[in-house]
Amino acid sequence: MTKSAPQGIPSTTTSRPLEGKLALITGASRGIGAAVARNLASKGASVILNYSSESSACQASSLAQEIATQYAVACFTVKADIGSPTGPALLIKSARDSFLAKSQAKFQIDIIVNNAGVASNASIQDFQIKDFEWMYRINVLGPLLLIQAALPYLPNDRSGRIVNLSSISSSEGFVEQSVYGGTKAALEAMTRTWARELAERCTVNAVNPGPVKTDMWDKMPLEHRGGLRPWTFHSPLAAVREEIDEQEIVDQKEFVGGRPAYPSEVAGIVAMLCSHDAGWCTGQVVCANGGMRMAI
């Protein structure tokens, strides 16, 4: 049974599984975050798009307009730095204020997707404390402070959904990822703890993408892509499809060993965990990497 759309929030006559739900996605202006926002909106959820920098404001605004028009749901944009001590609380307050300005309904956050994250590679000898603090602040402390700030607005009937974007870097021991891999391992540990602490309110799961065709992939030096070949080559779903995949991916298939995921593919798995049908799944790290990482 789904909630009816809150007063003041656009609705459609077509039944959609997330109709009337409100989803908050961090780092939502591009890449996986934008794909998740589109997917959840297509299923009827109103969405809060978080972004952190002025350079992303235009993208966030354009995405919000696209989503509101195409899916007939409410869409709000909120600038807030998840990596600052006050950013997560500011995000929740601003989202609440924006929602209540358009609706008389109760402000409840049904879905949170902790997608915002940063990465930087360095060998042991080149490691810098400032990079450690930067990555742990955004990838670990930020999600924790966000859930803390959101606690008053989470459901109380186990219908809530939290999905954390981890990475196979948490478990595969990639060279030069002492810090980044550690942040994702920490996020997975928090996922399990939150699943217990929030059991009467929501499920909490993580997904662990491998390489994804985002702007981070596009900026990755070719030699770094080639370094993924041993993993990509053995990923069952990474085989390049010449009539389907982008030409750049086809051209690099021998060197890279296969293809990265497309953001929509990862978003589909996130959305699956946000569904009513996923209500008996919590505390898990779910494969979102085409079989690059198979756990038992």
Image (cartoon, grey):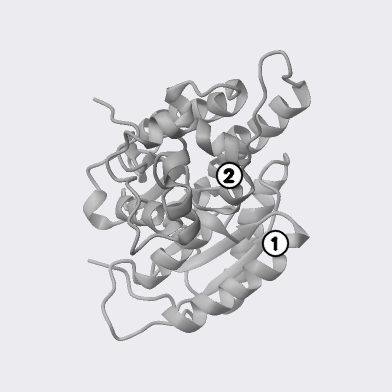
Q: Please identify the quarter of the rendering in which residue 64 is found.
A: bottom right
The residue that appears at 45% across and 67% down in the rendered structure is 38
The residue that appears at 55% across and 23% down in the rendered structure is 182
Q: Earlier in the sequence, mark 1 or mark 2?
A: 1
Residue 230 or 40: which is nearer the viewer?
Answer: 230
- Compared with 167, 152 (above or below) is below
Q: Which image quadrant: the N terminus? A: bottom left
The image position of residue 57, as x and y in percent, is: 71, 66
Residue annotated with mark 2: 146
Residue 296 has which mark?
none
Under mark 1, the amino acid is: Ser
Residue 285 or 262: which is nearer the viewer?
Answer: 262
Q: Is residue 206 left or right of residue 89?
A: left
- Compared with 214, 289 (above or below) is above
Q: Is residue 147 left or right of residue 244?
A: right
| Classed neighbour count for the residue bearing mark 2: other residues with Cα under 10 Å, few (<14), some (14–19), many (≥20) | many
- Compared with 59, 268 (above or below) is above
Marker count (numbered): 2
The residue that appears at 43% across and 24% down in the rendered structure is 172
Residue annotated with mark 1: 56
The image position of residue 177, as x and y in percent, is: 58, 25
The image position of residue 30, as x and y in percent, is: 58, 60
Whether residue 144 appears in this view of the structure is no
The residue that appears at 61% across and 24% down in the rendered structure is 179
The image position of residue 235, as x and y in percent, is: 32, 37
Under mark 2, the amino acid is: Leu
